[in-house]
Amino acid sequence: MLPFNDPFGDFMFSFGPVFFMIIFSLMVVTILVAAVKGISTWRHNNAQPVLSVTVKVVGKRADVSHHTHTQANNGIDHSNFHSSTTYYVTFEVESGDRLEFKVSGREYGMIAEGDVGKLTFQGTRYLGFEREKRAELGR
């Protein structure tokens, strides 16, 4: 019997391992870059002084991410839906400069636009907000 005449030769056997090595390397590099960036931000924030300034809350927003995971089990597809919400609050200092920080859902619910108080932060790290004057309703 004659061997199968493959027009590509052993292309898939020689390219396949190289392709998977490239993908694996890209994943490792991506993880390392994210880790270095996170450590750099953490170190930068730790080197900054803890500041408390009088601010007014001028904005709030929520960023909702939706994730779908599909898994096949015995020929049946099962989909899992998941969403996560990240909360942000924008504060304005007396000079008119604005600072936006990521806050917990609990903090987000307790803070209202128009509130005035003391914002405590360190670099880009939100540490807390103590309300001194509640926002006026009906504005």
Image (cartoon, helix red, strand yellow):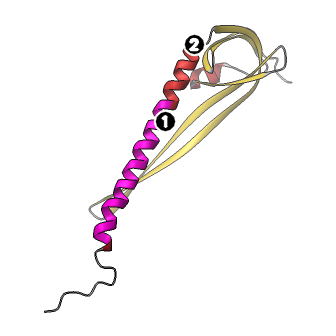
Using residue 110 as the reference point, say whether residue 93 is left or right of it. right
Residue 21 position, x and y percent, is 34, 54
Using residue 10 as the reference point, say whether residue 46 is left or right of it. right
Label 2 and label 1: CA atoms lie apart by 20 Å
Which quarter of the figure has residue 128? top right
Q: Nearer the viewer, residue 122 or 85?
A: 122
Q: Amino acid at mark 1?
A: Ala
Identify the residue at horizontal 56%, vertical 43% (top origin).
65
Looking at the image, residue 139 lies above or below residue 119? below
For the question of whether residue 113 can be seen, the reply is no
Identify the residue at horizontal 81%, vertical 20% (top origin).
137
Q: Which residue is mark 1?
A: 34
Give the number of the disc on residue 92: none
Q: Which residue is mark 2?
A: 47
Identify the magenta region.
12-36
Residue 18 position, x and y percent, is 34, 60
- Looking at the magenta stretch, what is its main secondary structure? helix
103 inside magenta stretch: no
18 inside magenta stretch: yes
Q: Nearer the viewer, residue 42 or 58?
A: 42
SS at badge 1: helix
Quarter of the image that includes the C terminus: top right
Looking at the image, residue 79 lies above or below residue 100? below
Which quarter of the figure has residue 23? bottom left
Identify the residue at horizontal 63%, vertical 21% (top origin).
124
SS at badge 2: helix
Quarter of the image that includes the N terminus: bottom left
Q: Nearer the viewer, residue 43 or 139?
A: 43
